[in-house]
Amino acid sequence: MLTSRPYSDGKRVVRVMSRSYGVIALWVNEGRGKNRRIAMWHPGAVLELSGMNRKGSEGLIRFREVRRTVVLDAVIRDPRRSAVVFFICEVIEKTMPEETPHPEIHDLMAATILEIESSSALGWIHAAFLGQLIQLLGIAPVAPASLNLKSLDLQSGDWKFEMGLEKESLERNIADGFMAFLEPEAAIPKMWSVADRKRLILGQVRYLQHQLGVVREIKSYAVLEAVFDNER
């Protein structure tokens, strides 16, 4: 599950990343009184839906039954884990086109959420997720052809011999980390600071959004940085 927004008493609009349909919007009836079910509707929840249907060509999707396939106790209880999950969910919701199936992205997201639930090392999981997301979408930049290239341009994906605007380019050492995280099991860069990680994450998001033609603020990142301010 990506986001949940109340619509009226006992009802809400929920966006999910479906393996078969991509990002879709659901009409959720929570029920009332003792039959009210809201605990499962949280960002990162791994759900299984059945009996899906839509009223009208552009209406919200409804479903007959829903169940949680995994209970994410640690994600729910630990603010650090919750912050990483919220960030990942917001990136997907604000960046991926709606109703465009990407089963490989769904599987990456599910695997990452399960890793967040169980891992003791959380500081770089979101960097690994973003790198693999860029790779799976087929929009990764090519490797630099020369050691003299100084920066990676985030709009074009080209390597440059000079540094561009700070917001729209990554200096070579950060860009090398960007390239490393395109691969699974990437090692955490040695001697990197928290500020270096911030440059990388913001660069990954900026690059991803430029390549997909949608640049939107990821508001949950500020919370994520505050939570991990002293954790490398």
Image: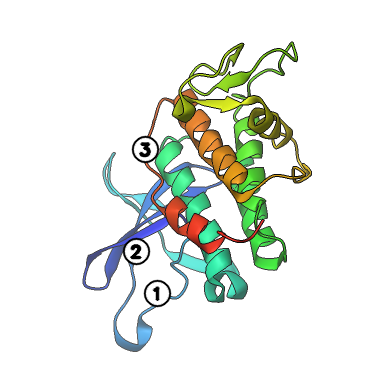
In this view of the protein, can residue 71 be seen by the observer? no
- Pair 1/2: label in front: 1
The residue identified by callout 3 is 216
Q: In this rendering, would 190 be left or right of 232?
A: right
Check whether the beta carbons of the residues at disc 1 and disc 2 lie within 8 A of each other.
no
Q: Nearer the viewer, residue 188 or 94?
A: 188
Check whether the beta carbons of the residues at disc 3 and disc 2 lie within 8 A of each other.
no
Dot placed on the residue nearer the N-terminal end, 1 or 3: 1
In this view of the protein, can residue 32 be seen by the observer? yes
Distance Cα–Cα, label 1 vs label 2: 10 Å
Q: In this rendering, would 144 be left or right of 42?
A: right
Q: Nearer the viewer, residue 206 or 16?
A: 206
Dot placed on the residue nearer the N-terminal end, 1 or 2: 2
Check whether the beta carbons of the residues at disc 1 and disc 3 lie within 8 A of each other.
no
Q: Nearer the viewer, residue 200 or 230?
A: 230
Q: Amino acid at mark 1?
A: Ile
Looking at the image, residue 48 lies above or below residue 186: below
Residue 38: assigned label:
1
Dot placed on the residue nearer the N-terminal end, 3 or 2: 2
Looking at the image, residue 24 lies above or below residue 137: below
Q: Residues within 10 Å of mark 1 (few under 14, many from 20)?
A: few
- What is the quadrant of residue 34 in the picture? bottom left
What quarter of the picture does the C terminus occupy? bottom right
